[in-house]
Every structure is written in structure tokens, then in C-alpha cells.
Amino acid sequence: MQRQLETGLLPDAPLDAATAFMALHLEAARALLADPATTALAILLPPAAHDHRDWRLALARDLAREAAPSRVNVVAGLPGEARDATLGFLANAPGVTGQYLVCHE
């Protein structure tokens, strides 16, 4: 079962956003992944500037490695059709993990 963790707003500066995620949401992500029923986790982040890409991709890759064989992907975007379609794809793509995907309406 694919679970979702939505963070809500994060700071504008990349280092501040990464720090906030690690302090406020990393343990929740790990707790979801510790549940034996969880086969995949989609972490939902708000849209951000391109300079956030590195920390978000590192989060996806490193948490996916730690959680294997469970899958972890990070999805950035506002609620809507594009994000829903991306989440639907990920739920049915057992080979996709450690990815950072950006959704645009």
C-alpha cells in the first residue's frame, strides 16, 4: 500500500527548508515506512524554486535506500489533477523509487 506524507509549507530558503523537513517530518516518514503494510511512501512537498532540487532529490534517494524494499518518492506540486495523476502512476509503478517528481497544472 502506498502511503502519503504531506508536509505543508516549508521555508523559502533551500537550507532552511531542508532543515525544517528533517526536524519536523523525517521521523513521521520513517514511522510510516516502519509499518509492514507500507510498500511505498510518497512525500508531498509544496512547489519550490529550482535551488531546492538537490536537497529534495537527496531526500528521495537516501530515504529510499534506507527503506528498501519499500519505495520512497518525493512529489512537489499543488493539489490537483497533475499531482493526483503522478501519485496514481507511482502507486502502480513497483520499479520506481528514489525519485523527485515535479507536477505542474
Image (cartoon, rainbow, N blue to C red):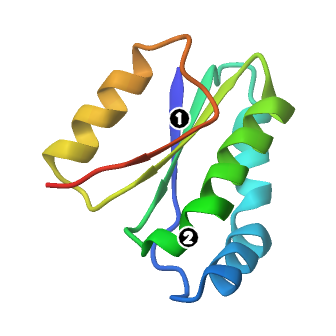
Task: Measure the alpha-carbon separation of dots 1 and 2.
Answer: 23 Å
**Residue 28 falls in which quadrant of the image?**
bottom right
Q: Is residue 21 above or below residue 99?
A: below
Secondary structure category for the residue under label 2: helix
Which label sits on residue 3?
A: 1
**Residue 46 falls in which quadrant of the image?**
bottom left
Q: Is residue 15 above or below residue 45?
A: below
At a point 58% along the width and 88% down the height, the residue shown is: 13
Q: Nearer the viewer, mark 1 or mark 2?
A: 2
> Where does the image place residue 55, in percent across and percent down from the top left?
67, 63
Q: Is residue 97 above or below residue 43?
A: above
At a point 79% along the width and 74% down the height, the residue shown is: 23
- Determine crowd level at label 1: few under 14, some 14-19, many 20+ residues with C-alpha closer than 10 A: some
- Determine crowd level at label 2: few under 14, some 14-19, many 20+ residues with C-alpha closer than 10 A: some
Secondary structure category for the residue under label 1: strand
> Where does the image place residue 82, in percent across and percent down from the top left?
19, 44
Disc 1 and disc 2 in contact, CB within 8 angstroms: no
Q: Is residue 18 above or below residue 100?
A: below
Q: Is residue 82 left or right of residue 75?
A: left
Label 1 sits on what residue type?
Arg
- Check the picture and name the quadrant holding the C terminus: bottom left
- The residue closer to the viewer here, 100 or 24, is 100
Label 2 sits on what residue type?
His
At a point 77% along the width and 42% down the height, the residue shown is: 63
- The residue closer to the viewer here, 56 or 68, is 56
Mark 1 or mark 2: which comes first in sequence?
1
| Count of number-bearing discs | 2
> Where does the image place residue 97, in percent across and percent down from the top left?
60, 26
Q: Is residue 102 left or right of residue 57?
A: left
What residue did someone put label 2 on?
A: 52
Which label sits on residue 97?
A: none
